[in-house]
Image: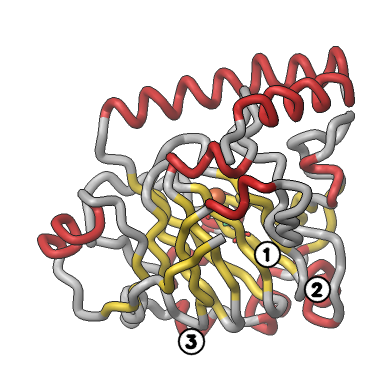
């Protein structure tokens, strides 16, 4: 596996972003995109615990990505404050994924500002991700085919990114937006195709925003306990259509077959991924 460091930029204009990063689909880290947001100084553990600790949140454990009854679903709900205290203290296998923060806690809208770096932001889908030290989000690309702007708060997060054409080295699982290979433990002996994998990497810190181009694979490691806000933009009709198709396919075919066949469906996907893999 060969990884290039992702560039860091500040003072970026919309025109330059469009020419140098959006059109060529090149990941980049903005160091100043949220400098004017109150959230940059306000959003921390105590603020969420004291002001919004009683809100009930959906929490997922490792069964989220495993075949069976919890596949692609949260496993329980708990109080936001209790969850944050838990992950702040020690590594735990509990995550909050794709949490629509403004729908659930509308008051927080006053702490953020719309991004103007490109057109097409989907204002109704501001998703937050929370996790303890050592947790990670397995490699995937975002099902709706949006461009993602992932802003990190408080702590560090390591991100690996791969272009769509790298799917052949990652054992892409059919009917899904995920892969068999787990990059937390990249074993080149078991998966020789990893030797030819090329991509990008960076470690985000507080207040930095990573641009993940539409359909780019990403693997995310929580170096420390922390949280991020993902804002998404999609300014292309064809990508929106592809996203809608992906969502229908996952919810109808993949979920349906998981319900019907459970781990046998998971094994079939792995076998197809292996057959399609290229060294
Ligand atoms: O930060 C994470 O855990 C996942 C973020 C992600 O996959 C996304 O924003 O698309
Ligand atoms: Fe994602």
The answer to the question of whether label 2 and label 1 lie on touching residues, with beta carbons closer than 8 A, is yes
Q: Judge depth for marks 1 and 3 and give the one in front.
A: 1
Q: Position of residue 253 (x, y in %)?
A: 67, 15
Q: Which one is in front, 203 or 89?
A: 203
Q: Judge depth for marks 2 and 3 and give the one in front.
A: 2
For residue 41, the mark is: 3
Classify residue 16 by image quadrant: bottom left
Query: Exactly how many numbered labels are in the figure?
Result: 3
Q: Quadrant of the N terminus?
A: bottom right
Q: Earlier in the sequence, mark 2 or mark 1?
A: 2
Q: Cβ of disc 2 within 8 Å of ligand 1?
A: no
Q: Position of residue 59 (x, y in %)?
A: 79, 53
Give the residue drawn at x 42%, y 53%: 148
Q: Is residue 237 above or below residue 46?
A: above
Q: Which residue is mark 2?
A: 87
Q: Earlier in the sequence, mark 2 or mark 3?
A: 3
């Amino acid at each position: 596996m060969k990884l290039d460091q992702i560039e860091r930029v500040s003072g970026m204009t919309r025109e330059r972003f469009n020419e140098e990063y959006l059109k060529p689909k090149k990941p980049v880290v903005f160091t100043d995109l949220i400098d004017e947001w109150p959230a940059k100084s306000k959003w921390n553990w105590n603020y969420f615990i004291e002001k919004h600790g009683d809100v009930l949140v959906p929490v997922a454990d490792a069964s989220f990505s495993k075949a069976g009854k919890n596949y692609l679903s949260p496993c329980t709900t708990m109080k936001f404050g209790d969850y944050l205290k838990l992950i702040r203290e020690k590594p735990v296998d509990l995550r909050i994924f794709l949490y629509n923060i403004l729908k659930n806690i509308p008051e927080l809208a006053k702490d953020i500002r719309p991004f103007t770096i490109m057109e097409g932001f989907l204002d109704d889908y501001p998703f937050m991700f929370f996790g303890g030290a050592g947790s990670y989000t397995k490699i995937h690309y975002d099902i709706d085919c949006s461009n993602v702007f992932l802003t990190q708060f408080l702590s560090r997060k390591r991100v690996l990114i791969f272009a769509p054409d790298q799917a052949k080295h990652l054992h892409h699982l059919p009917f899904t937006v995920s892969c068999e290979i787990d990059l937390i433990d990249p074993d080149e002996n078991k998966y020789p195709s990893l030797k030819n994998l090329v991509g990008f990497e960076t470690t985000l810190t507080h207040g930095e925003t990573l641009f993940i181009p539409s359909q780019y694979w990403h693997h995310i490691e929580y170096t420390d306990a922390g949280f991020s806000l993902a804002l998404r933009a999609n300014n292309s009709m064809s990508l929106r259509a592809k996203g809608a198709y992906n969502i229908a396919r996952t919810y109808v075919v993949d979920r349906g077959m998981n319900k019907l066949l459970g781990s046998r469906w998971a094994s079939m996907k792995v076998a197809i991924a292996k057959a399609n893999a290229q060294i």
